[in-house]
Image (cartoon, grey):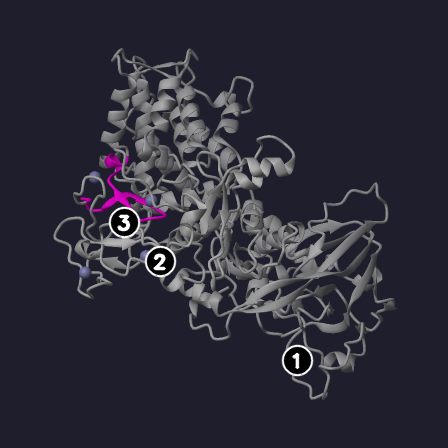
């Protein structure tokens, strides 16, 4: 169903508990077992947030479009909320002011009052409750800057901006200097945020203390903005905390905070990561592990992702990383690797085999890339070339175009691929915002399983850089991790990229209601299945063609303003009337009240509620008087129907699995395969035996009788709408504003003429039929 709308707008909230089911070492996880019992709506004494509270808060922040900075403007002297500043220097807000801050920042009307109260208390409770000299704030007030500092740490953004913003918040007179006690206050808010993000604050505190000592080297007690930012930008754990999104640079680890549920050892100081929560920084690409405090001590570089010159291509060698192989089996001598309370054994980053330290230098020295060999683009297939050649070709000096920027060495040489025989390197595109934060996790996993150079974050310049890097290969596959909307984006990019070959596309569906992915047997939504298994399925998948359709909407009166038409291409389906109207309302509702849409099941229930509401059916009553449909020049006779909606389908799934065309019994019209399929079929008897096919260059037209019927189809009580036609071209004319949708994206369209014609066929990968995982098929 139209859930993918929301995903496309990257505003999906994911059920956070899914995060836990990741791998044996749980990632940062704010849920703790039995956390619910810590919630304290009745106990007014408790001034800390429970983990559940914090998750709830994070979900709101995930949805939030505004920046703390913008909200702060409303508290300025001329802002709408100025009167809510209290205290001697008007630095404080009371609980009402705090509530308005949240309302403004999160753009929600009904933020839970009890959560708001607990959050407010947590600020009263924070370490520094009084600025120097002015004493503590009144009992029921908190400092506005503490509040904004805290929220700015949690929001999306660049560490440098966050450091600067927090500094300026506390720099009252704007002279670019803070005294050290004020910097201490910023650090206190950092710890406050870190604590809730699941960091071991005892680990972070000394790191920040050291940083402060280093910044204020003359010990005069003042810190300039420049010192503060420089200090922060050189502090690895702090950058990770500030949410630094690192991009792959050779030799640099991609750090992130991680919890370990078994003993692990630091690759720098070799001692164990201690503490109940056993956490440290772990490199996404090579699984190098360090204490927070050791991350600043020049750890050895991350694995190489390319070789130094073309001469070295084709030389397949293991790349060993020390340690944490406890109880793994040595691939050389087949004996168990026992950890003797130290960093033991070595793992190859590419084939993932383990060896004893003493077995590492034995044969075979050649790395075969292990079970994922078919997909991996190993470092010995990537080499740098001097940039000049390209510049000459482009006829302009120096400038590397945008698509190349991500595929260069640190000194600016352009990387090229030298194909590895008998492999199909996988070009992976991940939409990190799809499916809540699912996308980010999938991105990290692929960066580990494959070469980070073949895994692209779509928020980092879109599909261009990846397509450009792979453009000279003749045999490769693409994997799109995201919703149906993301797949459409990549297909468009392939159309426009002028590639030698059009690589086939597999889909790892993130989020919910991914109809295209479902039709290709990749399931409706990813729920944590082992990505290694998914890669194996991609290896076994088969290529299919999928029709794509151009849609042209010509308004009757070009002056009349409707919503913009969302797409020019239909990959999945197009509809007018009752179905689109539901999608439209649902979409608006979801944008407005994200918290009500935080689980897959709830989505279905809400949808049903909309589907059966009176107002919706009223909008589309007598639809047949508002439109005419022509299929290849033949007008459809709609007279005998009570029509409230029309759906035009390219694929057999719609709105999360409903098949509006319905199943077709195998008709035994012999030799039908040989027969040319007519351009258009409107005869109901022939339509009865026509099956749907995404590669027959035909669209299926279905009539929908009303909201109740739609509700029944979604909930499985009824199987299909009424078949009206199967056609290679369609023209629709409307005479009043009607709700419409393309691929789940709804809009309101004033009277118009719509032409839909065949555009081209995309090459897709269909998963092998038997998918054993049951949870993968959840909607
Ligand atoms: Zn260490
Ligand atoms: Zn690394
Ligand atoms: Zn290896
Ligand atoms: Zn061994």
Residue span colored magenta: 273-295
Q: Residues within 10 Å of mark 3 (few under 14, many from 20)?
A: many
Q: Which of pointers 3 and 2 lies earlier in the amino acid sequence?
A: 2
Q: Which residue is mark 3?
A: 321
Does any portion of residue 713 appear in the rendered image?
yes
Q: Which residue is mark 1?
A: 664
Specify whether 368 is left or right of 597: left
Percent across and percent down for residue 413 are 48, 37
Specify whether 728 is left or right of 125: right
Q: Residues within 10 Å of mark 1 (few under 14, many from 20)?
A: few
Specify whether 339 is left or right of 705: left
Res 201 → quadrant: top left
SS at badge 3: strand
* Distance between the alpha carbons at the discs numbered 3 and 1: 56 Å
SS at badge 2: loop
Percent across and percent down for residue 706 are 70, 66
Q: Which of pointers 1 and 2 lies earlier in the amino acid sequence?
A: 2
Asked whether mark 3 and ligand 2 are closer than 8 Å, the reply comes as yes
Q: Residue furthest left?
A: 340
Q: Residues within 10 Å of mark 2 (few under 14, many from 20)?
A: few
Q: Which residue is mark 2?
A: 21
How many marks do you count on the picture?
Answer: 3
Between circles 3 and 2, the one closer to the viewer is: 3
């Amino acid at each position: 169903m139209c859930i993918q709308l929301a995903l496309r707008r990257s505003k999906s909230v994911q059920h956070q508990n899914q995060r836990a089911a990741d791998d044996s070492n749980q990632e940062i996880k704010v849920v703790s077992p039995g956390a619910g019992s810590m919630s304290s709506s009745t106990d007014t004494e408790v001034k800390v947030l429970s983990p559940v509270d914090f998750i709830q808060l994070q979900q709101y922040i995930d949805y939030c479009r505004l920046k703390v900075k913008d909200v702060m403007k409303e508290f300025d002297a001329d802002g709408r909320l100025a009167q809510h500043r209290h205290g001697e220097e008007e630095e404080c807000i009371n609980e009402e002011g705090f509530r308005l801050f949240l309302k403004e920042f999160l753009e929600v009307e009904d933020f839970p009052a009890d959560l708001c109260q607990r959050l407010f208390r947590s600020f009263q409770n924070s370490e520094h409750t009084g600025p120097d000299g002015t004493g503590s704030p009144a009992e029921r007030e908190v400092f506005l800057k503490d509040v904004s500092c805290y929220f700015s740490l949690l929001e999306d953004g660049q560490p440098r901006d966050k450091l600067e913003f927090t500094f300026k918040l506390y720099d009252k007179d704007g002279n670019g200097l803070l005294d050290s006690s004020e910097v201490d206050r910023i650090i206190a808010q950092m710890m406050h945020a870190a604590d809730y993000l699941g960091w071991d604050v005892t680990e972070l505190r000394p790191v920040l203390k050291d940083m402060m000592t280093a910044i204020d080297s003359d010990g005069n007690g003042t810190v300039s903005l420049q010192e503060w930012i420089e200090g922060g930008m050189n502090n690895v754990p702090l950058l990770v905390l500030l949410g630094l999104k690192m991009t792959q640079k050779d030799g640099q680890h991609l750090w992130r905070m991680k919890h370990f549920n078994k003993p692990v050892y630091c690759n720098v100081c070799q001692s164990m990561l201690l503490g109940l929560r056993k956490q440290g920084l772990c490199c996404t690409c090579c699984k190098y592990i360090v204490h927070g405090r050791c991350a600043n001590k020049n750890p050895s570089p991350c694995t190489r992702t390319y070789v130094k010159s073309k001469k070295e291509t084709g030389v397949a060698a293991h790349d060993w990383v020390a340690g944490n192989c406890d109880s793994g089996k040595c691939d050389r001598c087949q004996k168990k690797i026992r950890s003797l309370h130290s960093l033991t054994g070595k793992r190859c980053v590419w084939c993932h085999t383990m060896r004893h330290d003493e077995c590492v230098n034995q044969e075979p020295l050649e790395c075969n890339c292990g079970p994922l060999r078919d997909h991996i683009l190993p470092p010995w297939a990537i080499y740098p070339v001097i940039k000049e050649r390209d510049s000459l070709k482009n006829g302009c000096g120096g400038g590397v175009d945008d698509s190349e920027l991500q595929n260069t060495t640190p000194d600016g040489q352009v990387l090229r691929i030298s194909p590895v025989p008998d492999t199909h390197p996988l070009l992976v595109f991940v939409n990190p915002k799809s499916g809540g934060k699912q996308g980010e996790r999938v991105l990290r996993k692929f960066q580990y399983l494959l070469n980070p150079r073949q895994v692209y974050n779509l928020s980092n310049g879109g599909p261009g850089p990846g397509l450009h890097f792979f453009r000279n290969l003749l045999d490769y596959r693409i994997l799109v991790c995201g919703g149906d909307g993301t797949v459409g984006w990549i297909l468009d990019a392939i159309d426009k990229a002028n590639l030698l070959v059009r690589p086939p596309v597999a889909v790892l569906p993130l989020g919910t209601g991914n109809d295209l992915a479902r039709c290709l047997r990749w399931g409706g939504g990813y729920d944590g299945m082992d990505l290694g298994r998914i890669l194996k399925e991609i290896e076994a998948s088969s290529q299919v063609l999928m029709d794509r359709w151009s849609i042209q909407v010509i308004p009757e009166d070009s002056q009349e303003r409707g919503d913009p038409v969302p797409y020019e291409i239909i990959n999945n389906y197009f509809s007018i009337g009752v179905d689109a109207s539901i999608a439209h309302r649902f979409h608006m509702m979801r944008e407005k009240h994200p918290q009500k849409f935080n689980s897959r099941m709830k989505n279905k229930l809400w949808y049903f509620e909309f589907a059966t509401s009176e107002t919706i059916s009223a909008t589309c009553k007598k639809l047949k008087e508002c439109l005419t449909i022509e299929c290849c020049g033949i007008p459809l006779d709609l007279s005998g129907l009570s029509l409230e909606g029309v759906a035009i389908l390219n694929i057999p799934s719609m709105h999360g699995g409903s098949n509006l065309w319905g199943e077709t019994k195998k008709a035994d019209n012999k030799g039908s395969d040989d027969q040319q399929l007519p351009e258009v079929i409107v005869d109901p008897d022939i339509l009865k035996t026509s099956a749907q096919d995404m590669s027959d260059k035909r669209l299926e037209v279905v009539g929908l009788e009303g909201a109740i019927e739609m509700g029944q189809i979604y909930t499985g009580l009824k199987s299909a709408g009424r078949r009206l036609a199967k056609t290679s071209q369609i023209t629709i004319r409307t005479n009043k504003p009607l709700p419409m949708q393309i691929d789940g994206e709804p809009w309101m369209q004033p009277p118009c003429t719509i032409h839909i014609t065949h555009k081209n066929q995309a090459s897709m990968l269909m998963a092998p039929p038997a998918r054993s995982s049951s949870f993968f098929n959840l909607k």
